[in-house]
Amino acid sequence: MYDEQHKPDHGQHGPLAGFTVGVTAARRADELGALLQRRGAAVLHAPALRIVPLSDDGDLLAATKEIVDQAPDVVVATTAIGFRGWIEAADGWGLGEDLLDRLRGVELLARGPKVKGAIRAAGLTEDWSPSSESMAEVLDRLLEEGVDGRRIAVQLHGEPLPGFVESLRAAGAEVVGVPVYRWMPPEDISPVDRLLDATVSRGLDALTFTSAPAAASLLSRAEERGLLPELLTALSHDVLPACVGPVTALPLQALGVDTVQPERFRLGPLVQLLCQELPARARSLPVAGHRVEIRGHAVLVDGVLRPVPPAGMSLLRALSRRPGWVVARSELLRALPGAGRDEHAVETAMARLRSALGTPKLIQTVVKRGYRLALDPAADSKYADA
């Protein structure tokens, strides 16, 4: 698990080298973390939720018995893990074969290919599955068929299904919910708090969400800590919020946060989207005959990745806001987190920054005034009015 920050080997840096990405996922967090690390990112993982199986839960047992005793007309399977969990729980109660017999005689709808795989692995065959993997398309099909007086079982999966059950009931259907597992707050909240702190302090470059409950849970924890305004500001300006799909983005969008989403709602396309978005946000400057690209926690100098301490990155960002201009020590001191009033802290952090960059001449000392990026003369006019 990626409970703490994991930094990759930058020997052969990828498109996300120098960037730090937060992961809020509970399910498939290892897979997402590995995809990000493989492309060079540092990963900070804090599951915003935990999944609680309901194999011993009375609600699931009651729903299963109800379906076995009185077959519904339609069963909607929404997630592979949920469908498998339901069959396994029924087996544990001695109802497995009875449930499968019932499911063979109903109209069985699968939300996507993974659910189809789980259905077929159980020896069943789905009647239909939407090409978009969208619950909205499933709802449209059911309403077009007509649901008045029909009994529809919906495998709930802990995530909100906006308007789905309500729309079916409004159209005259009897809806039976099948609660296979639930999302609960994490038992240990400290990783979530560290993730929140890293977000509001801009220690992250992007924050990923793969479920709406995880987004809602993180927002709720931020509100409990009095950090919600700071979190929303960070996500609106500096930290890129990346969601796997539009349903996942709803809790953020409801608070005015714009998110990015891949065209295909999958982990791979989500990572590819970050590989495009984050490098495009990096600041690239011609400095002292070198090409300098400023990333989240590292700098590319002529294509060579140079990890930089947080204090050094703070100084470098302050200098890059007005490239070529002299920035006073007092202003740089304000950019240093927790530095107090001692301007000597600026000199110490600057020495470490120069050492980390490996090219001391990138930053010039202007006696009694401060420091400046040694912008190439040809580029001076371009940034003069910046």
Image (tube, grey):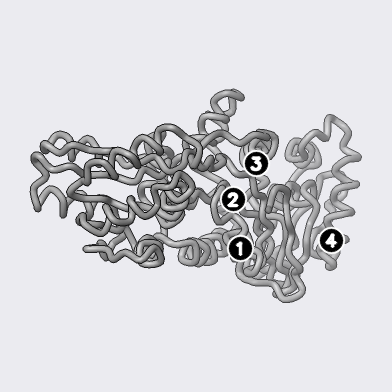
Mark 4 or mark 1: which comes first in sequence?
A: 1
Instruction: Give coordinates of residue 289: x percent, y percent.
Output: 73, 73
Instruction: Give coordinates of residue 16: x percent, y percent.
Output: 62, 65
Which residue is labeled 1 in the image?
A: 36
Q: Which amino acid is tagged 4?
A: Ala
Distance between the alpha carbons at the discs numbered 4 and 1: 24 Å
Mark 3 or mark 4: which comes first in sequence?
A: 3
Q: Which amino acid is tagged 1?
A: Leu
Relative to 312, does residue 213 appear above or below in the rendering?
above
User: Mark 4: few, some, or many residues within 10 Å (few <14, many ≥20)?
Assistant: some
Q: Which amino acid is tagged 3?
A: Leu
Which residue is labeled 4 in the image?
A: 356
Relative to 312, does residue 298 appear above or below in the rendering?
below
Residue occupying the point 65% across, 62% down: 41
Which residue reaches farthest front?
Answer: 94
Task: Give the number of marks.
Answer: 4
Q: Secondary structure at mark 1?
A: helix
Mark 1 or mark 3: which comes first in sequence?
A: 1
Mark 2 or mark 3: which comes first in sequence?
A: 2
Which of the two residues, 97 or 347, is positioned nearer the viewer here?
A: 97
Mark in the foreground, 4 or 2:
2
Q: Which amino acid is tagged 2?
A: Val
- The circle on residue 23 is 2
Distance between the alpha carbons at the discs numbered 3 and 4: 26 Å
Using the rendered view, name the quadrant where residue 375 is placed.
bottom right
User: Mark 1: few, some, or many residues within 10 Å (few <14, many ≥20)?
Assistant: many
Q: Are marks 4 and 2 in contact (CB under 8 Å)?
A: no
- The circle on residue 195 is 3
Distance between the alpha carbons at the discs numbered 2 and 3: 9 Å
Instruction: Give coordinates of residue 179: x percent, y percent.
Output: 39, 39
Instruction: Give coordinates of residue 58: x percent, y percent.
Output: 43, 32
